[in-house]
Amino acid sequence: MKYKISELVAKTNVPKSTILYYIREGMLPQADKIKSNVHRYSDEHIERIKYINYMKEHLSSTNEQLKHILQNNNQSFASSSGMITPLMNTLSGIPSDAIHYTKETFISAFNVDIDLLNKLLEDEILIPINDNDFTQKEASILQLVQYYREVGISYDVLKMYVFHAKALSLLEHQIQTQLCDIRNEENFSLLWKIVFETLFNVKTYIFNRQTYKAFFSTLKKEISI
């Protein structure tokens, strides 16, 4: 459907000035120009505005972060693959202002043990988003592993995290596939909310509460001794 700017404002509860700002910043596609001073907006504008609102409200995303995700993304969220595309930058966990290093410069900048680095890459404890692209995030994981070594214990727990993370990623992919299979124009906004809530709310909630439960159980045993 095509909408006037006033209709877009009414459907999204976002002011006209904000919508025009999003368009100028590349966060929304340009409107169709029917004739001079007459523009029409589409369902994709509504989808993206709802996405922007959700990201700001629930993930505290900034305009700059959202611009990085949305700018020059010409694929409508209404496609099955488009449903997961906006998540990729968020899932990478890399800030937009992060400093990037090649493997060579990373080794030099952080005085990295090359053998240890290659081992962690092989074990997939370190997983650069792109080949030969390292950041401070990889350096922090590497530092943690070095702490393990300093105190003389194995970092096998991190290997187990990798094992279970792979299994969990397959489950999450299955969920996303099922949601895409039932996607239609009426339920799309609800489906990507389900994806986001599952990945960024429920998963953290369940993991942290299970850790709390295990620690609390241990604490009770120690107190009762």
Image: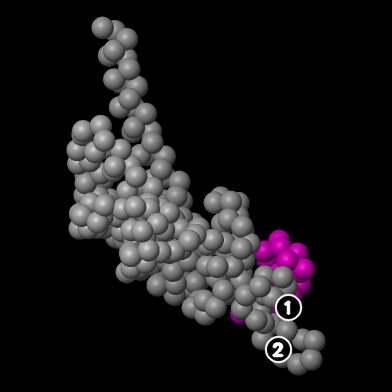
Q: Over which residues does the magenta segment extend?
A: 1-19
Of label 2 and label 1, which has the lower sequence position? 1
Q: Which residue is mark 2?
A: 33
Q: Amino acid at mark 1?
A: Lys
Q: Is residue 199 magenta?
A: no
Q: Secondary structure at mark 2?
A: strand
Horizontally, is 221 left or right of 180 in the view?
A: left
x, y percentage for residue 78? 48, 73
Q: Which mark is residue 225?
A: none
Question: Which image quarter holds the N terminus?
Answer: bottom right
Q: Secondary structure at mark 1?
A: loop
Crowdedness of circle 1 by 10 Å Cα count: few (<14), some, many (20+)? some
x, y percentage for residue 167? 23, 52
Please give the name of the residue rendered at 48% of the width and 61% of the height, measured from the top-left corner: 99
**Secondary structure character of the magenta stretch overall:** helix
Among the 4 quarters of the image, the one containing residue 134: bottom left
Horizontally, is 159 left or right of 184 in the view?
A: left
Please tell me which residue lies in front, 129 or 164. Answer: 129
x, y percentage for residue 37? 80, 87
Q: Is residue 4 magenta?
A: yes
x, y percentage for residue 211? 34, 32
Please give the name of the residue rendered at 26% of the width and 7% of the height, measured from the top-left corner: 225
Q: How is the image coloured?
A: one colour
Please give the name of the residue rendered at 30% of the width and 21% of the height, measured from the top-left corner: 217
How far is disc 2 from disc 1 in space, using C-alphas?
A: 11 Å
Q: Which residue is mark 1?
A: 4
Residue at the outermost bottom position? 35
